[in-house]
Image (cartoon, rainbow, N blue to C red):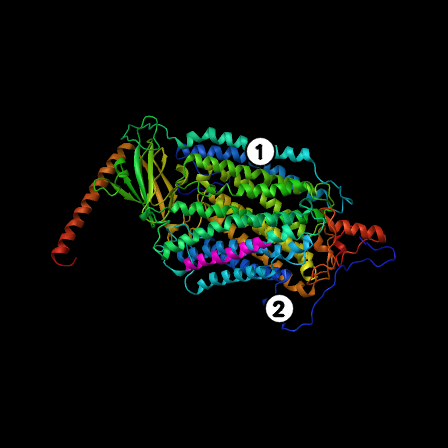
């Protein structure tokens, strides 16, 4: 997944990780076909006229001032192409923005956008900060992402396979943008705002992503990894992570009290 | 090819105006500082903006060199962010917008048959404010250049995250160049509305003048908004306001709306005059009237109107409701229609023409070829779900270079080769010009075409380095090599100008058999432009004059030193 060929994605965006990314990919391909026809047609007409109508070959230019029918014709033609693309986009749109049902055994459910039809999903809060992503697991993160009870991780996100994962995205400093190409489009992480996206990935797989909005000097290193594992592995990872966090917290508490006692803090 | 066959019976009246000048009392360089002559100001604009173009180009080459290989250490993240901010700001505010004002300054009065701009001293002020803006901005090189990008999105551009004075210099630059452009725009508007030659009704206005008129109107609409926005940013940074500060209920998204309400019309401010130049160059070298004059003029106005309704397509990934995204997708689609109409009309102008393959026409045809792809990728980006994948990636970088380099810089080069003989009285070397074209065209496509693929492969914008093994390395290397080929093309044009400024073949007043009134006067034109302002009877007044002279004398009008370009 991390080492595609040298000429990966020459003409189409990345996809394959999540239904929304796949739907965007197929919408893109439809536009690409239409665009290719227009491109070849117009460039062809340009190159043909540059070749065919040189002064060497055509001594006298035809003195034509215009043609109203032609003008109306290509105006309507161009508009029709765009009407078709509009219809295609709005037909595709629901499959891109509305998450499907979780197919794995459900983990939890809550009410906030976006929601799959049966409401079963995993909420992960994504917090952008210079220059790392922080992930807080569980719907309770939406009320307080710094709640002591919630497991969290940095940079690498762990998610269960076949589960609709809803991301609730914000930033604690400047604007960042959450983007894992294979798992769907990007969403800005704007301080003071909460934005949402979702994905539903098959596993096991590892997806690479990167902050897409200029956020400062180390913007280039603000990467993200999404590690898709089985739901049981996910459960055990969660308890491990809880364990690790509480161990680290108690160590810090001990250290703090030691330092305070000895007058070093 | 020879045009003069019979012995000349009557001398052909070539010189239609004479220089009137007082005896020189000051030194030559002082003339340039105190001048209010639109031609001198125009040349100062062109020279200054080309200097900034070179600086912006060097910044681009540094960035491309850094990105040539993964994990390159030529530049740090800090230096890279400074360079991308300098490059974007320079190219937009100090090159493309003012270079159009440069051509406009020189040619608007000549093409409409006026002796100067409506407000000559205001015109000089416009230029000096532009230069001041450029100097203020480039002084940051000596302390701390801004590094928040040319959009300067807060909070990154706020005092907490960009504490240096470079960001304030950026704000100052926006104000100075903004006032410069605003005054220039008012001047263009007043000149075009009031000072046209007798008989030049709106239906006989050259298409370049239509473009400059609409450019002026768009500047007047858009610039006050960005002036307000950067003032708000300035008070946020230094005077305790919280317009864009989310910790005090301000909104960073407000900045995005304000900035792009200016920023998208700005795109058309940059390309519409370019479209105007193309609409002048193509009919002259096709030896054919422009196809669909009214459609092209009307599409210019329609593009300008729609340009004020599409700004949020830069914000498809921002917190904006879906229904708003839908509106901006449709409005962005709509703008494709008048743009397409222009391209169809240009190609139809060449259709069944008799193409004189000058360098200027090469660049004009190159513009159509390149801009078309920029327009098509614009449709991809207007579809907001697709934009979620493409926004802020190299696909966008490729897209806007295809539109701005294709839609504005290629026309500027076409205009340079077309109008250089008028401005200096000498022709540029055509052979060298064509070589420069091929370097520029191939280099451009090599640099930017692969960037579409880079974006599709997931490479985001504005990163100063990347890891190997992501499928980006080959594309990046191709792009960097292309950038240097492109640079060779531009340098060849600069050398061409430097050599032929004094030594080029004499052009005479009308080397190309032009259609518009600037070709009626000697090259370079005298200070007063016209002794007698001819009456305009069509959209191609110079063609009418040439025909009239040919009919009355029976002699084909000489075309200066460049008969070789003109069909017998």
Q: Is residue B168 magenta?
A: yes
Callout 1 secondary element? helix
Report in which chain the residue with disc 2 lies: B
**In the orientation shown, which residue stands out farthest toward the top?**
A118
Q: Position of residue B90 (x, y in %)?
A: 50, 56
Residue A210 placement, left or right of B201: left
Q: Residue at x 24, y 38 (%)?
A: A238
Q: Is residue B63 visible?
A: yes
Q: Nearer the viewer, residue B247 or B433?
A: B247
Q: Is residue A212 visible?
A: no
**In the orientation shown, which residue stands out farthest toward the left?**
A261
Q: Is residue A142 above or below residue B115?
A: above
Residue B178 placement, left or right of A134: right
Q: Nearer the viewer, residue B163 or B234?
A: B234
Q: Is residue A81 above or below residue B503?
A: above
State which region is magenta: B166-187
Residue B119 placement, left or right of A162: right
Q: Marks 2/1: CA distance?
A: 53 Å
- Name the residue beneath numbered marker 1: A79
Q: Residue at x 58, y 67 (%)?
A: B33
Q: Nearer the viewer, residue B190 or B20?
A: B190
Report in which chain the residue with disc 1 lies: A
Q: Is residue A31 magenta?
A: no
Residue B427 occupies which quadrant of the picture? bottom right
Residue B511 placement, left or right of A219: right
Residue A96 occupies which quadrant of the picture? top left
Image depth: mark 2 or mark 1 in front: 2
Q: Position of residue B321 (x, y in %)?
A: 41, 36
Q: Main secondary structure of the magenta part?
A: helix
Callout 2 secondary element? helix
């Amino acid at each position: 997944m991390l080492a595609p060929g040298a000429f990966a994605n020459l003409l189409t965006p990345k996809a394959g990780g999540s239904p929304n990314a796949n739907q965007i990919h197929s919408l893109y391909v439809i536009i690409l076909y239409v665009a290719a026809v227009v491109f070849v047609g117009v460039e062809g007409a340009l190159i043909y006229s540059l070749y065919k109508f040189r002064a060497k070959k055509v001594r006298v230019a035809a003195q034509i001032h215009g043609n109203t029918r032609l003008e109306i014709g290509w105006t309507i033609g161009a508009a029709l192409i765009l009407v078709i693309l509009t219809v295609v986009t709005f037909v595709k749109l629901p499959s891109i923005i509305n998450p499907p049902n979780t197919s794995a055994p459900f983990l939890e459910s809550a009410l906030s956008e976006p929601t799959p039809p049966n409401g079963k999903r995993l909420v992960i809060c994504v917090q952008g900060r210079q220059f790392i992503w922080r992930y807080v697991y569980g719907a309770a993160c939406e009320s307080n992402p710094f709640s002591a009870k919630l497991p969290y991780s940095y940079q690498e996100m762990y998610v269960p396979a076949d589960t609709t994962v809803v991301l609730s995205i914000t930033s604690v400093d400047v604007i960042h943008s959450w983007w894992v190409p294979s798992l769907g489009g990007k969403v800005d992480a704007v301080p003071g705002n909460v934005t949402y996206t979702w994905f539903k990935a098959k596993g096991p797989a590892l997806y690479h992503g990167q902050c897409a909005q200029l956020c400062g000097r180390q913007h280039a290193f603000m990467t993200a990894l999404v590690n898709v594992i089985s739901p049981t592995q996910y459960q055990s990872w969660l308890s491990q992570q809880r364990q690790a966090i509480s161990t680290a917290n108690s160590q810090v508490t001990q250290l703090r009290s030691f330092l305070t006692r000895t007058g070093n803090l | 090819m020879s045009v003069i066959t019979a012995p000349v019976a009557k001398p052909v009246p070539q010189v239609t105006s004479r220089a009137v000048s007082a005896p020189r009392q000051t030194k030559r360089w002082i003339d340039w500082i105190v001048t209010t002559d639109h031609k001198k100001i125009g040349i100062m604009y062109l020279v200054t903006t080309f200097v900034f173009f070179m600086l912006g180009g060097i910044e681009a080459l540094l960035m491309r060199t850094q990105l040539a290989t993964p994990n390159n250490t030529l530049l740090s993240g800090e230096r890279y962010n400074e360079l991308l901010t300098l490059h974007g700001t320079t190219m937009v505010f100090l090159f493309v917008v003012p270079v159009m004002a440069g051509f406009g300054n020189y040619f608007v009065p000549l093409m409409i048959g006026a002796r100067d701009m409506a407000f000559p001293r205001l015109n000089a002020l416009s230029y000096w404010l532009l230069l001041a803006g450029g100097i203020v901005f480039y002084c940051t090189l000596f302390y701390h250049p801004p590094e928040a990008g040319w959009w300067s999105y807060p909070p990154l551009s706020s005092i907490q995250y960009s504490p240096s004075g470079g960001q304030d210099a950026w704000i100052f630059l926006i104000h100075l160049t903004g006032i410069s452009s605003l005054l220039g725009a008012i001047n263009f508007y007043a000149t075009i509305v009031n000072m046209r030659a007798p008989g030049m009704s709106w239906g006989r206005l050259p298409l370049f003048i239509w473009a400059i008129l609409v450019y002026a109107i768009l500047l007047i609409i858009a610039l006050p908004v960005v002036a307000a926005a950067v003032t708000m940013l300035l008070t946020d940074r230094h005077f305790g306001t919280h317009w864009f500060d989310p910790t005090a209920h301000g909104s960073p998204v407000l900045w995005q709306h304000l900035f792009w309400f200016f920023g998208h019309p700005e795109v058309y401010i940059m390309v519409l005059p370019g479209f105007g130049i193309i609409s002048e160059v193509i009919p002259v070298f096709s030896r054919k009237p422009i196809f669909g004059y009214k459609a092209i003029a009307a599409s210019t106005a329609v593009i300008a109107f729609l340009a004020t309704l599409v700004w949020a397509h830069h914000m498809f990934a921002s917190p904006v409701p879906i229904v708003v995204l839908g509106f901006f997708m449709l409005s962005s689609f709509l703008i494709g229609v008048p743009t397409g109409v222009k391209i169809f009309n240009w190609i139809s102008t060449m259709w069944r023409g008799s193409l004189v393959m000058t360098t200027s026409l090469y660049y004009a045809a190159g513009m159509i070829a390149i801009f078309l792809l920029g327009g098509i990728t614009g449709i991809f980006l207007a579809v907001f779900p697709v934009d979620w994948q493409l926004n802020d990636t190299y696909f966008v970088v490729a897209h806007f270079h295809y539109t701005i380099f294709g839609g504005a810089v290629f026309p500027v080069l076409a205009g340079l080769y077309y109008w250089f003989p008028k401005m200096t009285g000498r022709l540029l070397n055509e052979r060298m010009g064509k070589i420069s074209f091929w370097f520029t065209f191939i280099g451009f496509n090599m640099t930017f075409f692969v960037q579409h693929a880079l974006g599709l492969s997931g490479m985001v914008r504005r990163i100063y380095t990347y890891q190997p093994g992501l499928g980006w390395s080959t594309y990046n290397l191709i792009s960097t090599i292309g950038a240097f080929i492109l640079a060779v093309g531009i340098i060849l044009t600069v050398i061409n100008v430097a050599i032929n400024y004094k030594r080029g073949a004499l052009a005479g007043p009308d080397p190309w058999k032009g259609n518009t009134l600037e070709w009626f006067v000697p090259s370079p034109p005298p200070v007063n432009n016209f002794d007698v302002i001819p009456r305009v009877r069509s959209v191609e007044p110079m063609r009418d004059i040439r025909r009239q002279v040919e009919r009355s004398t029976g002699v084909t009008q000489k075309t200066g030193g460049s008969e070789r370009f003109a069909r017998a």
